[in-house]
Image (cartoon, rainbow, N blue to C red):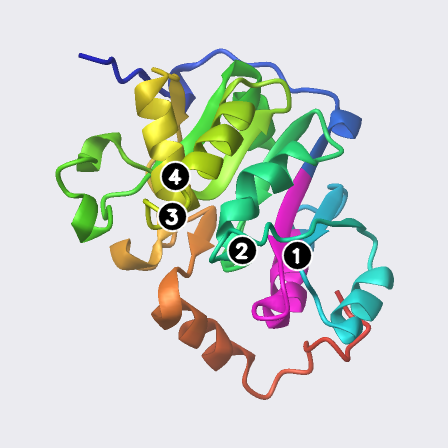
Amino acid sequence: KRRSIQVEAEELPVSSPEPEKCGIVAMGNETVEWLLPWWLRNLRLQNPEISVHIVDLGFSTSARKWLSKQNVSSSVLELDSCYSCPWFMKPRAIASSPFQFTVFLDLDCEVRSSLDKLFSWSTRGLVMGKDRYPFSNYGKLFRRDHFFNSGVIAVHQSHVVIPRWIEATEHLHDKLRGDQEILNLTIYENEIPVVVLPEHFHQLRLDGDHPEAKIMHWTGEAGKAEIQNRLKGSDSLLDSDET
């Protein structure tokens, strides 16, 4: 029987890596690019000095023009033609990070706090938050207390999980639902330890909004609808020069 090794982040003695070695990575394409101004503005409000790198999986010309005006770096990653969904590119996007210590954030994550602790915890291993809602089809494969959400990941670039996740994706992209399920299977099969985020640090929509949430993750179509609701009447679209 394989072991599941979990360590509570707040129980670890950690040291902070040098800021120039740390950065945030996100990825997207034309379908989700409308989230970019909202996502970046929230991130910058709480983390004004942090470096940001955006992986372009197929943005529109207007989104690329907008990105060029922001204080971020970017790179283009061609979507593998055999992948049905862009989320399967997530491990490759993380592998392409220009930072030694990377925090990957989905674009539907609302950052509400400093993310410094994520970089500190990543000096001790792969950092993720638990997800109590594995897709129902995988109920027998993944247990609730051993399933992690891939919307927020903190990791050092040399961590073994990255190449193993890439390799597993190449073999399992047509068998499992998404990057998250493949990552969880990779963690389980390789007995990779996980540094578990404190409760409410990465708060999922299905758990409800919470005042202590450091990152509020508006998952799914309902989550995107909530963000769109909040953006109504706002000028923060891609034709804006604001971050």
Confirm whether the magenta stretch covers residue 187.
no
The quadrant in which the C terminus is found is: bottom right
Query: Residue 2 or 18: which is nearer the viewer?
Result: 2
Query: Residue 160 or 68: which is nearer the viewer?
Result: 160
- Camera sees residue 212: no
At mark 2, the secondary structure is: helix
Numbered label tally = 4
The quadrant in which the N terminus is found is: top left
Percent from the top left, x then y, of residue 169? 46, 37
- Whole-Å distance between the Cαs marked 2 and 3? 13 Å
Residue occupied by mark 2: 86
* Kind of residue sitting beneath label 4: Leu
Cβ atoms at labels 2 and 1 below 8 Å apart = yes
N-term-proximal mark, 3 vs 1: 1
How busy is the neighbourhood of tag 3: few (under 14 within 10 Å), some, or many (20 plus)?
A: few
* Kind of residue sitting beneath label 2: Pro
Marker disc for residue 57? 1
Marker disc for residue 239? none
How busy is the neighbourhood of tag 1: few (under 14 within 10 Å), some, or many (20 plus)?
A: many
Q: Residue at x 69, y 50 (%)?
A: 55
Looking at the image, which residue sits at the far front?
A: 82
Residue occupied by mark 4: 172
Cβ atoms at labels 3 and 1 below 8 Å apart = no
- Whole-Å distance between the Cαs marked 2 and 4? 14 Å
Q: Which residues are magenta?
A: 24-43
N-term-proximal mark, 2 vs 1: 1
N-term-proximal mark, 2 vs 4: 2
Of labels 2 and 4, the one closer to you: 4
N-term-proximal mark, 4 vs 1: 1
Q: Residue at x 73, y 41 (%)?
A: 50
Q: Residue at x 75, y 28 (%)?
A: 19
Cβ atoms at labels 4 and 3 below 8 Å apart = yes
